[in-house]
Amino acid sequence: MCLAVPGKIVSISGEDLERQARVDFGGVVKEVNLAYVPEAKVDDYVMVHVGFAISVVDEEEAEKVFGYLKEMGELGELAEPKPDTGAKQ
């Protein structure tokens, strides 16, 4: 099943179609392309599918979706936040 996962933007770099964000998914930070959501900004929540943010959502919606995915067991590596080892992600 293909699902979009909510995450919070912690930083943004680049411009236009090359705009990238570091997005926090409950403790796991990944690089995400923001080409489809040019309005997204730091501290926004976005729905991410295959490395692309596809929509901006509010915090309540993000938490609700994350909870549903956790209940269904669809979070994979995002289900358990990794301990902070001090290494940059």
Image: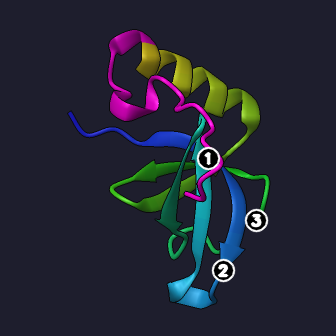
Q: Is 73 included in the stretch rendered in magenta?
A: yes
Q: Residue at x 69, y 72 (%)?
A: 12
Residue stretch rendered in magenta on the structure: 71-89
Label 3 environment density (alpha carbons within 10 Å; few <14, some 14–19, many ≥20): some
- Answer above or below: position of 4 versus 56: above
The amino acid sitting under disc 2 is Ser
**Mark 1 burial class by Cα count in 10 Å: few <14, some 14-19, many 20+:** some
Residue ID at (39%, 60%): 51
Residue located at (55% from left, 70% from top): 34
The CA distance from mark 2 to mark 3 is 11 Å
Front residue of this view, candidates 39 and 21:
21
Q: Quadrant of the C terminus?
A: bottom right
Return the residue at label 2: 13
Badge 1 element: strand
In primary-sequence order, the first of circles 2 and 3 is 2
Residue 33 position within the rendered picture, expressed as x and y whole percent measured from the top left: 49, 70
Q: Mark 1 belongs to which amino acid?
A: Asp
Q: CA distance from mark 1 to mark 2?
A: 15 Å
Which residue is found at the position 72% from the left and 66% from the top?
Answer: 11
Q: Where does the image place residue 16, in percent across and percent down from the top left?
A: 59, 88
